[in-house]
Amino acid sequence: MCGLLGLICSTEADAASARDAVDAAMRCQRHRGPDEHDTWADAEVVYGFNRLAFIDVDHAHQPLIWGPPEAPERYTLNFNGEIYNYKELRDELAAGHGAKFATEGDGEAIVAAYHYLGDDAVKKLRGMFAFMIWDSQEKVVFGARDPFGIKPLFYSAGPGKVAFSSEKKSLLELSSVLGVEEKLDKTALQHYLVLQYVPEPETLHTGIRRVESGTSFRLVPGGDVEFTRYFHPQFTAKPVNGQAEADALYERIADVMRDSVGKHMISDPDVTVGAFLSGGIDSTATATLAKEHNPNLIAFTSGFDRQGYSEVDVAAETAAAIGVKHVVRVVSAEEMMEAMPLIVWYLDDPVADPALVPLWFIAREARKHVKAVLSGEGADELFGGYTVYNEPISLAPFEKIPGGVRKILGKVSTKIPEGTRGKDLLRRGALSLEDRYYGNARNFRDEQLRAVLRTYQEGVGFKDVTAPWYRVSEGWDPVARMQHVDLFTWLRGDILVKADKVTMANSLELRVPFLDPEVFKVAATIPVDQKLTHGTSKYALRQALAKIIPGHVLNRRKLGFPVPIRLWLRDEMYDWAKGIISDSRTDELIDKKAALALLDEHKEGQHDRSRQLWALLMFMLWHGIFVENRIKPEVPEPVYPVKL
């Protein structure tokens, strides 16, 4: 697990002169790999690398040079991630192609697979990854990002140069070398305020984009980057008829999850892997199955001293039931306010999901004990866990109403006072799925955004992001279409960004066994009635885990890592929030009077504006750090685990 930076130039002279700049830019991501640091250059390519070592700690150094016997130094790999099936892949390449390996690490499996299998090698990889391979013989760079987007990869292109990086900050440091003038992307800002995250491939800087999840790329020095999507997920439900078929499905789910967790526990013997534990079935399942491989597993939970905003008690009961050591971190409003500028610095772009705050604190605590943790991200998207997935069922009566009448109902809903019961149901019932669902996030509506965003652009909206994915899923059942949209919006834009950024900020690797290609193959076949039935979400998953996890967790509604910002913004955090808005130099972008009015409206209890406010506050902090250079968080040196 690492931080990488790669610069590809059109001339050797440009590459040679940029080596020191690449080395300096790597300091921005030293938290991603405190175990080892290096730079490497060859012809038109410069690599920078920070390593957090897990497999073959003493020998699998990077950048990694590999080649077949006839050209042993042909390829150089820069790799961030873990390949969980690398042993099987190495054996396959050795048996089928005579591949030779000098280390016991997973990196060589990637390069060897590329040499013998070409671009399709990426389809063989079971893991989380972002990598670049320089082929010194063909003078070409090949790279890829994992199917779900667990590991990040940014890129920036200037005249004759292209750079790729795990951290956007490093590319900002290289902007003068690249010859790229970085400006704020106003379209991306509008998307962010609606979605609560910046959608791929955008960032808030015009000159920096992201390699999309499930995509590979090729680049010849001096040329343009050519992208190819290799991962095309499809939810192809298969009917389940009778209890025997249902039981067989549950067994397949249990088997593939046990196999995936086993793969995700891989590490050298002296590297400890723990688990995050909330009160829900997802994290409980990963922790329970992980304990089969590590009897001394440590589980970590965060919470708040507010009733209804903490799962510490349930998590403690679960930890006792499965027999693992339990570490708890309770977070105060004061700690949260103090930490926010630093957290936003680590994020690169703002993510308006308050759940990343407790995740930050528990990651910081976990890093004192372990180097990696398992977590339950992805279970809701794959198995149908979000409450909103029930919406097609609740709105089914509207589908029987003629389109013209539905439009009239939609217009009627606009006349109903905000906060009136049934207003939102009527509004959404009047819309098609494509017009109403943009992922598991709902923030500013158009009319609300116009009042706050001075740069509001008519014609820019969530459909810019969702339309391509709805086209792919045309003809699927509505729940499957919602899940598919979430894979390419909410999951990779919010869930996985915060998971990667705040854990790696603490030099902690987060592993997500649910987001495994083999798990997806099984989950994709589950029919709607095995996802949502009798008011229960993730029904098939719950049945599959019934004999694995403690009974008190099985049918309990998950809180996750909830944050009491709704209450705090009316009380403890009000002055803090008012100060951020007042001090911000975003007047050309945000109507600060309107933002302050939202804050006062929220404080007075007229409406819950906490989500909209949080999005504005995170952007204003980001702007203060990355645009104004007014806010300067003190970035600590990477932390290390204690000796157990």
Image: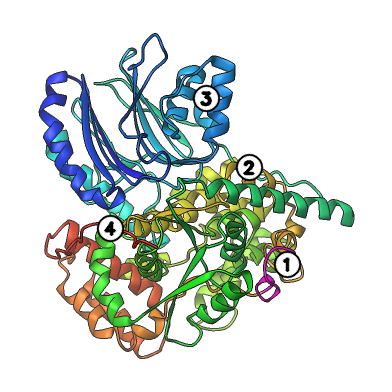
Scheme of colours in the image: rainbow
Left/right of residue 362 with respect to residue 11 in the rendered view: right
Q: Which residue bears the numbered disc 1? A: 397
What label sits on residue 346 in the rendered view? 4
Q: Earlier in the sequence, mark 1 or mark 4?
A: 4
Q: Earlier in the sequence, mark 2 or mark 1?
A: 1
- Whole-percent x, y for residue 191 in the image: 37, 56
What's the distance in space between the residues labelled 1 and 3, CA to CA?
46 Å
Find numbered disc 1 in the image and state the secondary structure of the residue it sits on.
Answer: helix
Find numbered disc 4 in the image and state the secondary structure of the residue it sits on.
Answer: helix
- Whole-percent x, y for residue 210 in the image: 35, 42
- Whole-percent x, y for residue 90 in the image: 53, 27
**Between tags 1 and 3, which lies in front?**
3
What's the distance in space between the residues labelled 1 and 4, CA to CA?
46 Å
Q: Which residue bears the numbered disc 2? A: 518
Residue range (magenta): 547-555
